[in-house]
Image (cartoon, grey):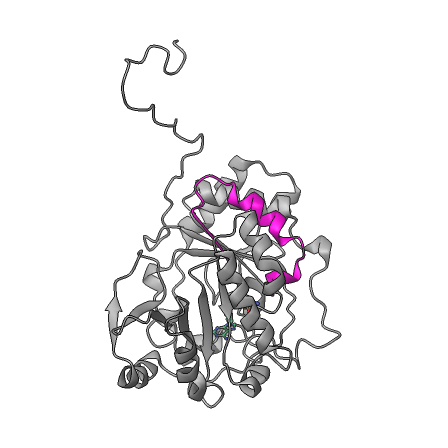
Amino acid sequence: MGHLGQNAPMSSHPTPDPAPVTAPVETRDALGRPLHDLRISLLDQCNFRCPYCMPEAEFHADYEFLRKQQRLTYDEILRVARVAAGLGVSKLRLTGGEPLLDKNVADLVARLAEIPGIDDLALTTNGMLLARMAATLADAGLHRVTISLDSLDEAVFRRMSGGRGDLSQVLAGVDAAQRAGLSPIKINVVVERGMNDNTVMDLLEYFRGSGHIVRLIEYMDVGNRNGWRMEQVVPSRELLERIVQRWPLGRVDKKYAGEVARRYKYVDGQGEIGFISSVTEPFCGDCSRARLSADGVLYTCLFASHGTDLRESLRNNADEEELTDILSRIWLQRADRYSELRSPELAEAHMQRKVEMYRIGG
Ligand code: SAM
């Protein structure tokens, strides 16, 4: 057998790189959806107590969050991420809880950035600790950040962060992320009727022309602890009508099939905004995301009531082949489409059973 390339005819073209040992195999679920996106929740703790996610009454001083030994180690996270990349995942997002509460997160970022096939490495944060960490994260290989910021009205922001947020610190985080090149920066705004819906226009005005992309998210019925009611949801359509009266918008095509935000551009060239309308316009048909909780449970839907524990297999030294087998079986069987089927009956049946957002991130 000749050494690869030894007997190859001379060519003026450079020799292409050999195929990676584990070339991604596209795995499709029971509804034909590929697996492209893995969200990794680093920890379940958060420095905010947003009433729609981690209400203070439930997540009080005595609440028992996961202990360190219950959480996946970086090595374990990396093993899952590598296997996921082998099954077609090209996008990783670190989330939580608040991922920046993990002071060593840049070390993990650096290792995730080296996984072949990962071309998009992002992190979702409330921004409170971002100013001091943005440059280190960018140096480690993070591509971009999404920053959650529900209002620029100090009082409303404070209320929506459960009395814990400091608006100036979050805005400093946005600036630091921009300086570090963690862009395009997305600003996530959960819109809740009677809470912050009347502050949305000011927030849009502030970010118009900045290059940052504001995404208006319908308040979702994730988890069971936020007391979600349909009346609190402001349908994206209603917001869109309000916005176009002031700033005409044009539709932007999807960048890729699994993109959840419906994108628009300001006609006057001042940038882009998006709507995430999981409640009134569900997008299950395109959903290509899996979610890994901090304690190693893999969920295939944001509204799931159960997931698959990977931690035990990881700690029993499952090798790459075994993990690939477990992950691909989970994905092949996946048939979730909670948002499309959402009904009072289904919501009722899921009550007390849905996984909480703080465990699997947004
Ligand atoms: N702590 C980080 C942060 O605040 O961005 C990451 C985790 S947080 C759970 C991720 C995203 O989920 C945030 O943008 C948050 O606003 C959003 N979120 C949480 N609960 C939500 C709900 N009930 N409806 C819509 N979005 C929600």
In the rendered image, residue 122, in percent from the top left (x then y), is placed at: 49, 56
Q: Does the magenta stretch include residue 19?
A: no
From the image, which quarter does the N terminus lie in? top left
Front residue of 339/329: it is 339
Which quadrant would residue 134 be assigned to in this image?
bottom right
Which residue is outermost to the right?
62
Which residue is outermost to the front?
179
Does 272 appear above or below 41? Answer: below
Which residue is outermost to the bottom?
194
Front residue of 47/55: it is 47
Q: What stretch is highlighted in magenta?
A: 97-123
The residue under the point 42% across, 31% down is: 20
Q: Does the magenta stretch include residue 121?
A: yes
The residue under the point 33% across, 69% down is: 271
Q: In this view, does 304 lie to the left or right of 58?
A: left
Which quadrant would residue 128 be assigned to in this image?
bottom right
Please indicate, yes or no, whether residue 244 appears anywhere in the rendered image: yes
Does 315 appear above or below 275? Answer: above
Q: In this view, does 14 lie to the left or right of 3?
A: left
In the rendered image, residue 158, in percent from the top left (x then y), is placed at: 59, 83
Front residue of 302/354: it is 302
Does 294 appear above or below 219? Answer: above
Does 281 appear above or below 255? Answer: below
In the rendered image, residue 17, in percent from the top left (x then y), is placed at: 38, 28
Front residue of 319/259: it is 259
In the rendered image, residue 93, in percent from the top left (x then y), is placed at: 50, 56
